[in-house]
Amino acid sequence: MMLRAVIRRAASNGSSPSLFGKSLQSSRVAASSPSLLSGSETGAYLHRGNHAHSFHNLALPGNSGISRSASLVSSTLQRWVRPFSAETGDTVEAVVPHMGESITDGTLATFLKKPGERVQADEAIAQIETDKVTIDIASPASGVIQEFLVNEGDTVEPGTKVAIISKSEDTASQVTPSQKIPETTDTKPSPPAEDKQKPKVESAPVAEKPKAPSSPPPPKQSAKEPQLPPKERERRVPMTRLRKRVATRLKDSQNTFALLTTFNEVDMTNLMKLRSQYKDAFYEKHGVKLGLMSGFIKAAVSALQHQPVVNAVIDGDDIIYRDYVDISIAVGTSKGLVVPVIRGADKMNFAEIEKTINSLAKKANEGTISIDEMAGGSFTVSNGGVYGSLISTPIINPPQSAILGMHSIVSRPMVVGGSVVPRPMMYVALTYDHRLIDGREAVYFLRRVKDVVEDPQRLLLDI
């Protein structure tokens, strides 16, 4: 209908319909040229609403408008085709993967490859440091890294393009110039336009020049923390995102919870005797060593079942009681502290707990642990004894309500049956939220841990 209206207007203006038909035919030929698009691609691009609408508007004035619209369509199609064919044909883009529901961004810590190096599909080319874990960016295909689109230290989000990878070196060299031509043509006209505006801009700063010296002081006054003057033999290193997150959570825990710690000591004689007696048979059957950590995990599970309030948490004006036991274990790595979770610890035996601990600790040290493996947890056990800690007051891991601290085993003189004998002793500490847990429940909890560790047979008899 619109074409008929155009023909009528052209006829009324005295223009030749045949000339209009020729120009329209030339526009159709240009739009359907095989060198630009073919088949379904032509239909996909010609039927885009905005571009089709602008074509008809340019065609209304007359023959000259039709010819201009034809050239506009052909040039627009050429610009569409080049990046489309380059991105899907010879090059691929490595993007930041999804990092977890609770993580919105991360810091690009380091590049594992350099531009020009060949990579294989699914090979890590860079690492992203988040608040909780380190995530690898993998190459989507085999090829040669053409260029990196971000720098080390930049903050990136899921979906951010990180690198362009060429599937072949020859095609990469051909694609690059075609992509850079529009950039050079666009940037060349811009300098004259900026030069023309310079006289207008220069007139304003002349009056503002005296105010320039007064502008630097405000940022220094608004700084929250004073900057220490530089000294010799010192080096300043930015905090990692993991360290920042740990610092924030620990400070929030200190500001939110009413922290209180109670202590007790445990005689490790029977548990160590049980371990030395069955460690070989345990390893032969289950393929994992029998450690002391599994004994304390089982003791903590028993204590949580006897004192459910320690496994609960405050949520606003309500108390959430958990009918499951997911115990977090604090693991210290070279990059910081991570707390993976042993899920369903109340349904595991010693062997299953030891296998889970070994698997989570290995992933934590290698930096391959996932967000899901650290999410949740209703109670935490921290073993500072592996580093030689004698006694300490652990801090609660939010949003939990308590944490059990284990310490080193030291042989000390103890009174047993009226005689002073050396015993392997360990101090244990329970830090709890006093808003929810009273001293009575905390002491009973720690006494239950002590009773089970000193007499593991209680677990068999459930007494």
Image (cartoon, rainbow, N blue to C red):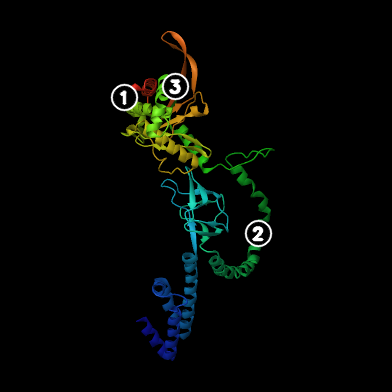
Q: CA distance from mark 1 to mark 2?
A: 84 Å
Residue under the point 61% across and 46% down? 218
Image location of residue 194, percent across then percent down: 62, 66
Q: Are marks 1 and 2 in contact (CB under 8 Å)?
A: no
Query: Which residue has dot 3 on it?
Result: 263
Three-letter amino acid code of the residue under disc 3:
Phe
Q: Earlier in the sequence, mark 1 or mark 2?
A: 2
Quadrant in which the N terminus is drawn: bottom left
Three-letter amino acid code of the residue under disc 2:
Pro
Residue under the point 46% across and 19% down? 425
Q: Residues within 10 Å of mark 1 (few under 14, many from 20)?
A: few
Task: Report the disc number at residue 246.
Answer: none
Image location of residue 210, percent across then percent down: 68, 53
Three-letter amino acid code of the residue under disc 1:
Leu
Q: Are marks 3 and 2 in contact (CB under 8 Å)?
A: no
Q: Secondary structure at mark 1?
A: helix
Query: Which residue has dot 1 on it?
Result: 460
Q: Secondary structure at mark 2?
A: helix
Q: CA distance from mark 1 to mark 3?
A: 26 Å
Q: Secondary structure at mark 3?
A: strand
Query: Which residue has dot 2 on it?
Result: 205
- In this view of the protein, which residue sits in the foreground, 128 or 51? 128
| Front label number (3 vs 2) | 3
Quadrant in which the C terminus is drawn: top left
Residue 119 visible within the image: yes
Judge whether 414 appears above or below 154 on screen.
above
Residue under the point 44% across and 23% down? 428
Q: Residues within 10 Å of mark 3 (few under 14, many from 20)?
A: some
